[in-house]
Every structure is written in C-alpha cells, then in structure tokens.
Image (tube, grey):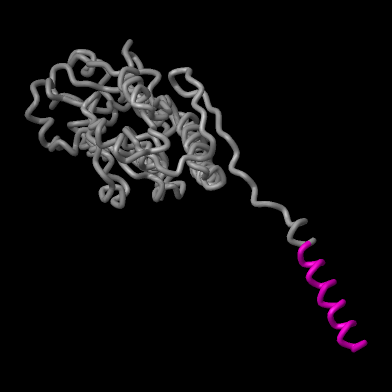
Amino acid sequence: MKNKSLATLFLTILAAAALLGACAAPAPAAQAEINLVDGLERTVALDAPAQKIVTLSPPLTEILFAIGAGEQVIGRDSFSDYPEDALALPDIGGGYSEYDLETILSLEPDLVIAGSINTPELVQSLQDLGLTVYYLSNPSDLDGTLEAILTLGQLSGHSDEAQTLADELNTRISAVEDALADVTIKPSVYYELDASDPAKPYTPGPGTYYSDLIARAGGENVGDAMEAEWAQISLENLLVADPNYIILGDAAWGVTPESLLERAGWSTLSAVKEDRVIPFDDDLLARFGPRQVDGLETLAKILHPDLFK
C-alpha cells in the first residue's frame, strides 16, 4: 500500500508539472494590425496581413508571386499574365474602369490592391461595396520599385521574403553600377513605346522609370528633352538627336528593325544605318517589380557590351 501511495503521489506531481508547463508556455504570437498610408493619402487598416487578395494590375500580381504570396491571390486583372500560374486565377476584367465588380465582390477578398492604371473613382466604387482597397502608386525609379515590394510584403504578411528579394535585387543593381563606374561616354537612346504615327512616336520622357533605367544602364534618354513624362517626339527632333541606339519597346506589336526602313525619313538615322535597332521586351521595364532589374541588366549589356561578357 505504501508503494502504491508513493506511486500515486509521483503521478500527481508529474501531472501538476505538466499542467503548469502548459500554462507557462507562450501563446502563439498574434498577427499585428497593419496601418499604411496609400498613394491616395488614405490610411488603410487591416487587422492582420491579407489572406485573400485581388489585384487590379499586372505588376502587383507579379510582385506578390515573387515574394511567396501567390497562393493568397484569389483574383487578378485580365492583363496579369506573369508568372504563368497567375493565369489560373479568376479573371476580374481590366482596363481603366472595365472591371467586373460583381465578381470581385463574390470572391470575398479581405484586400483589393489597385495601381496607377486604376482611377480614384474605381477605388471609391470598391470601397462603397464594403471592400478594403489599397492604392499603390507606380514608382518613378528602381528605388521606388524596391519600396513597393516591401509594402506588398507588409500587406500580405511576407515582409521577410520581400526584404530578402529587395536585398538580392539591390546586389544585382550594385553589380551593374560597379561595372559602369568608369564609363564616361554614354550612348543616347530613343526608346519607342508606340509609333502608330511614325512622324510623332511616343517615347518616355523625364521623371519616368524608363528614363531612370536607361540612365542606370549607362545611357542617355533622348526623351529627357521632352516636357511630358509620356511624350510624342517629332521626327524633326528625333533626327536632330540622332540617337546611338533605338530600342523597340513596341516589338511585341510586330515592329521590327526592318520596318523602320519603311518610315519616311527614318533611314537617315545613324542607329538605323548602323544596325543598332534592338527589339525589346517592354514588360521588363513597363511593369515595376523584380523583372525591372532583368531589364536593367539587359539594357546595360546592349549599351556597353564590352563590360558585360
């Protein structure tokens, strides 16, 4: 009996210790509330990182997938075609205002992320439906792109992954800068966005991420002489600038180096005569996000091939 009493006492002590240990164990950390001011100067509040996200522009979708938040995206705009996995998501429309608000509402997102392609009126319409909307303005340079990545990391609960990606991109940017550190001659670049009217084609002007990337790649954007950010340059001004390189950002629409010979006056440009007209994937520059650094590296290799072998 004595041994049985001791055994019972021992088991009781063990049980009590286990109970005390369980009580003392720290509770799982609660997800912190998020309060961020968006591009429309509105404070957007979330009780916790968004788990059901609808994106309204391709760069937003691309960045979320890049930081490991792809599984939290439950709907995307019609133009979000990268990465390929995004194509499997419900399509909620696209354009400046052609979105299917009924479909967006049916998805029951806890956050809709809009971009500069979207109007403040659309944001208000989504808010009126009771949805939480964060408006992320397009950055004007690579530094702004890295900030956008960190912001989307906060909103989605992937801050660590976003910081890791930003650090990796910064390392690649620094490698390009180091390679170009001693460059003194910077070739001039005409970047073509749209030459539906070849006498007045559209080109990116000053203050654009295109201009920032061309400069970082060791070139000079002839569009910097324009007044508007998205400008039509006259053929006369283009002939005077006579750029060293012509970069065809509209190559996806069937524009080729050979087709420039069919434009009146273009055959006299040095870049055309000397075979320095380069088709280019405009998505690498137009869509702010990780692939802009791919675009930077590609541009630098085009403009300074001897430094990147």
- For the N terminus, the quadrant is bottom right
Left or right: 275 with respect to 184?
left
Classified by dominant secondary structure, the portion drawn in magenta counts as helix
Residue placed most toward the observer, 124 or 229 = 124
Q: Is residue 92 above or below residue 19?
A: above
Q: Is residue 306 above or below residue 208?
A: below
Tell how many labels: 0
In the rendered image, residue 9 lying in the magenta stretch gets the answer yes
In the rendered image, residue 38 lying in the magenta stretch gets the answer no
Q: Residue furthest front?
A: 1
* Displayed quadrant of residue 100: top left
Q: Is residue 118 above or below residue 159?
A: above
Q: Position of residue 130 (x, y in %)?
A: 38, 27
* Residue 175 visible: no
Residue sitting at x 57%, y 46%: 160
Q: Position of residue 212 (x, y in %)?
A: 42, 27
Q: Residue furthest right?
A: 2
Residue placed most toward the observer, 105 or 112 = 105
Q: Position of residue 163 (x, y in %)?
A: 55, 43
* Residue 82 visible: yes
Q: Is residue 290 above or below residue 136?
A: below
Residue placed most toward the observer, 57 or 33 = 33
Residue sitting at x 84%, y 80%: 8
Q: Position of residue 186 (x, y in %)?
A: 40, 28
The magenta span reads 1-19
Left or right: 160 with respect to 220?
right
Residue sitting at x 31%, y 37%: 58
Residue sitting at x 25%, y 33%: 102
